[in-house]
Image: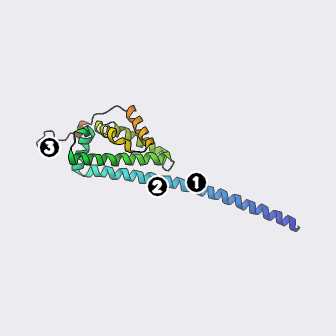
């Protein structure tokens, strides 16, 4: 075997090593992308759970939430401020979910569940009242998405399961 043949074999081996390295790196990048989407989805779900925990574990906040989703405009003072803050938290979380999914940074199947929850949330009369005055402060694509969900969803009444009653049984 002469030096030209040895050089050709070396070039073939070198080119093969480069191709194998590129294929390996592509597989690693794909795997890392899948993992980062899962992490982002878990993070978004965790943030949603934190918001739910506020309402689910604090009686006063739960009461404000129920009043606010029924009729936000009837609230005054501190109750209205707290309700607006809760609504902001819920909608900012939904906006982040929407943006992450739209940019491919979260799993697409998550969007289906996000849309179901967002549609239900946007069906409440009080949240619609709040959205009319505050929705303009959100990302335009998210505003368009939320407005489409509102248009496609009938306004719902808050379940009687959420009636607010004081100790003597009368409505509060």
Q: Position of residue 18 (x, y in %)?
A: 71, 60
Label 3, residues with CA under 10 Å away: few <14, some 14-19, many ≥20:
few
Quarter holding residue 80: top left
Find the distance from the CA under tag 2 to the CA under tag 3: 43 Å
Q: Quadrant of the C terminus?
A: top left
Q: Report whether 137 appears left or right of 165.
A: right
Quarter holding residue 91: top left
Tell which circle, 2 or 3, labels the residue nearer the N-terminal end. Answer: 2
Q: Position of residue 87 (x, y in %)?
A: 31, 45
| SS at badge 2 | helix
Q: Residue at x 61, y 55 (%)?
A: 27
Give the farthest residue toward the left. 168
- The residue to which callout 2 is attached is 39
- The residue to which callout 1 is attached is 30
| SS at badge 3 | loop
Image disc number at residue 166: 3
Quarter holding residue 141: top left
Q: Report whether 57 appears left or right of 116.
A: left
Q: Nearer the viewer, residue 56 or 151?
A: 151
Label 2, residues with CA under 10 Å away: few <14, some 14-19, many ≥20:
some
Q: Residue at x 30, y 49 (%)?
A: 85
């Amino acid at each position: 075997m002469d030096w030209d043949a040895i050089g050709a074999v070396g070039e073939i081996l070198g080119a093969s090593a480069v191709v194998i390295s590129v294929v390996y790196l592509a597989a690693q990048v794909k795997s890392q992308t899948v993992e980062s989407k899962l992490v982002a989805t878990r993070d978004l779900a965790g943030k949603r759970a934190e918001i739910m925990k506020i309402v689910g574990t604090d009686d006063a906040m739960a009461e404000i939430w129920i009043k606010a989703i029924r009729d936000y405009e009837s609230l005054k003072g501190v109750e209205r401020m707290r309700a607006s803050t809760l609504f902001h938290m819920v909608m900012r979380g939904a906006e982040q979910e929407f943006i992450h999914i739209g940019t491919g940074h979260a799993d697409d199947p998550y969007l289906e569940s996000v849309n179901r929850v967002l549609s239900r949330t946007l069906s409440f009369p009080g949240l619609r009242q709040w959205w009319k005055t505050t929705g303009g402060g959100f990302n335009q694509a998210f505003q368009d998405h939320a407005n489409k969900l509102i248009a496609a969803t009938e306004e719902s009444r808050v379940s009687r399961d959420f009636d607010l009653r004081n100790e003597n049984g009368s409505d509060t």
